[in-house]
Image (tube, grey):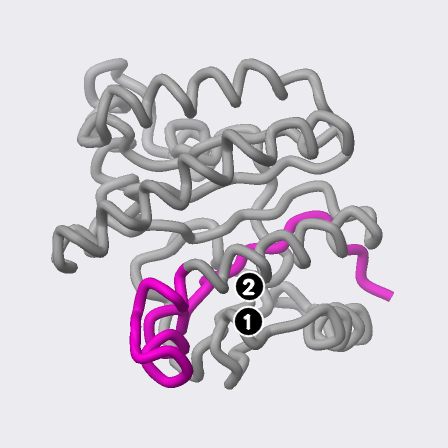
Amino acid sequence: MNPINHVAIIMDGNGRWGLKYKNNRKAGHKAGIQTVETIIKESLNQNIKYLTLYTFSTENWRRPKDEINFLFTLLENFLEKKISLLIKNKIRFKTIGDKKPLSKKINSLLKKKESKTKKNKKLQINLALNYGSKNELINAFKKMKVNKSPITEKNISNYLYTKNIPDPDLLIRTGNTMRLSNFLLWQLAYTEIFFEKKLWPDFNVNDYRSILSKFKKLKRNFGKI
């Protein structure tokens, strides 16, 4: 049985769900928050130590401004209302991505929540926010050049946003789309990938358990026979 230390998720399909059921993309994003809470609770039950959620990509800035503002409002509300739940369940909150383009208000909020939960060790939630793997790698190489660090696999990993975070054991992407969308390209080298047809708001605890169960039974060779 394969141990599961780190699960990464591309939460795709919120907007499509909203249009399909409510004729409104925003309704889908709001519904997706409930699924996030469900998956966090089950990750705790499964004793998973790291959960990385692809929340907002560097390419998502191409969306309508109104939708972008709504997404960040949802994020603010989630952090403000759920921080007590994170603390109670000994969950650490961390952001990975380029935070410089984000508003002062969002940056301040993220910093406060990271500080309040930094001693928690039961589960670490990594929120990939304004995250793009290509930018992450470029920034890593720039820093390595400045610091005159030799180019090795270990050094590259140490300059990424995910420094000190183990690579994902499995990646789940909902929404019936089979691509990585510039997410953790370096870190996913030997990650098992599960593509799920359901849109994110429809993804439930039984779907999650089923994928975790399938993963545990896989034969993982890592290049060996």
Q: Are marks 2 and 1 in contact (CB under 8 Å)?
A: yes
Residue 216 appears in view: yes
Q: Image check: 81 left or right of 207? A: left
**For mark 2, does the 10 Å Cα neighbourhood hold few (<14), some (14 to 19), or many (20 or more) residues?**
many
> SS for tag 2?
strand
Q: Which residue is mark 1?
A: 193
The spot of residue 112 in percent (x, y) is: 48, 16
Front position in the image: 50 or 141: 50
Residue drawn at point x = 52 percent, y = 21 percent? 114
Q: Image check: 174 left or right of 49? A: left
Residue 18 is covered by the magenta coloring:
yes
Q: Image check: 222 left or right of 122? A: left
The spot of residue 208 in percent (x, y) is: 69, 69
Residue drawn at point x = 13 percent, y = 58 percent? 64
Marks 2 and 1, how far apart at CA: 5 Å
Residue drawn at point x = 27 percent, y = 24 percent? 144
Q: Which residue is mark 2?
A: 171
Q: Is residue 218 above or below residue 141?
A: below
User: Which residue in the rendered view is the most extreme toward the right?
Assistant: 1
Magenta segment: 1-29
Residue 218 appears in view: no
Q: Quadrant of the N terminus?
A: bottom right
Which disc is residue 130 wearing? none
> SS for tag 1?
strand
Q: Quadrant of the C terminus?
A: bottom right
